[in-house]
Image (cartoon, helix red, strand yellow):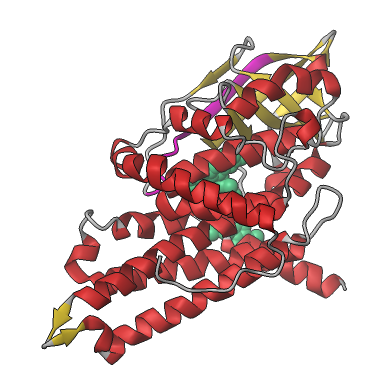
Amino acid sequence: MVAVVASPSSMSDEHELLRQTVRQFVQSRVEPQAMAHDESATFNTALLRELGSLGLIGVTIPEADGGAGMDATASVIVHDELAYSDPGFTLAYLAHALLFVNNFYFASNAAQRKRYLPRTLTGELVGAMGMTEPAVGTDVLGLQMTARRDGDHYVLDGRKTFITNGPEAGVFLIYAKLADRITTFVVEREFPGFSSSAKIPKMGMRASTMCELVLEDCRVPVENLMGTEGGGMTNMMRNLEIERLGLAAMSLGMARRCLDAMVQYATERRTFGKPLAEHGQIQRYIGESYAKVEAMRALTYNVAATLTPGSRNRLGTDAAKLFAATAAKEVADAAMQVLGGYGYCTEYRIEQFLRDTKLIEIGGGTLEAHQKNITRDLTRR
Ligand SMILES: Cc1cc2nc3c(=O)[nH]c(=O)nc-3n(C[C@H](O)[C@H](O)[C@H](O)COP(=O)(O)OP(=O)(O)OC[C@H]3O[C@@H](n4cnc5c(N)ncnc54)[C@H](O)[C@@H]3O)c2cc1C
């Protein structure tokens, strides 16, 4: 690691220990498998279970319920470190640990936690979250999946698409409209009327998978209503904030990797009788990339320090992801330019990071969605 920085002030000894633990795990277990899973476009579920055995799935879940009892900063550390090595796997981890486990925990009741939490905290049971539909993405409040009560079941009808972990997951948080009000349900793959499509091929983040979910007269027991009827908006909006923070942290990890790669290459590669690093135009790529990495680090960790299950920071989490997404893509592009033809080929993995950084400008809210949210919040003040 060549970039030298001071730790953000919100970092405790416990956070530093967590970073060291994750970094060691990344070097020994994540890095060796990353390229192969990008090439084969497969999610390494055994690696997810290894994270579970280290207690890294329930980072934000209280210790009393089997988690690590840590905060949003800790979650950012894990995403930052994992994405330095394997962004696709980190996206699968995010979909499991934040979109399912964190979301589920803060909206579920004791019986639901007993049934689903232990196996999702170990990674034995993979989770996913279904919000997006074939005809509804950014305009999520217009979602069309319906739910109706039928005796001791709810019956769900509709489709979800782009669902990360969809092919592997055994349990899903599904948003549907019950009497036109968004409501959350815990849906098991084995419930009658549930099916999923083949994997959807994609440009980047290929070590995670996604597919469409099809619910046709899907029967969900009443005890699998999460929270209250019509209460889905609250947990959807609350969880979107930590999701966006996790995605900003992933951008930071990817940008750090690309910066390190370009600094090392510019030091070793010589043209016109001197190292690349001595050419002014290359210095511009490196200097600007370093500044972007530091800015995204400061913003992401600052916002993380404000986020708790009881406090909201939509403005901050939108801003962190809006800035980090584009900055990371620019840093990856700069790295490819510094590495020239070697950057364009697969060996140094820069082409992979360039593909992977692009996703953060779309998934979990597009750039345009963040711009709109931020403007709406600022003009309301
Ligand atoms: C790899 C990947 C993984 C994903 N994982 C999940 C998951 O696990 N669960 C899940 O529920 N979803 C998931 N998604 C879906 C993701 O959140 C959506 O793709 C995203 O919210 C955008 O929705 P959309 O693709 O339907 O785009 P659209 O909403 O159709 O937008 C298309 C374009 O128009 C722009 N646009 C739309 N409305 C406006 C407007 N009013 N003003 C200006 N511009 C506008 C958008 O910003 C975008 O540029 C995933 C997507 C990808 C690509």
Q: Quadrant of residue 186?
A: top right
> Residue 48: where, in percent of width, then height?
50, 32
Please determine whether, in this image, residue 254 is positioned above or below residue 163.
Answer: below
Does any portion of residue 213 appear in the rendered image? yes
Q: Quadrant of residue 318?
A: bottom right
* Residue at image location 21% in from the left, 74% down from the top: 268
* Residue at image location 27% in from the left, 83% down from the top: 277
**Extreme left residue here?**
273
Report the side of 73 relative to 183 (left or right).
left
Please determine whether, in this image, residue 147 is positioned above or below residue 286.
Answer: above
> Residue 321: where, in percent of width, then height?
61, 62
Point out the image quarter for the N terminus. bottom left
Report the side of 241 relative to 271 (left or right).
right
**Extreme bottom residue here?**
280
Q: Nearer the viewer, residue 32 or 217?
A: 32
Does any portion of residue 202 appear in the rendered image? no
Magenta span covers which residues?
204-218
Point out the image quarter for the C terminus. bottom right
**211 part of magenta stretch:** yes
Report the side of 211 relative to 284 (left or right).
right
**138 part of magenta stretch:** no
Q: Total number of numbered labels?
A: 0
* Residue at image location 53% in from the left, 63% down from the top: 325
Q: Main secondary structure of the magenta part?
A: strand
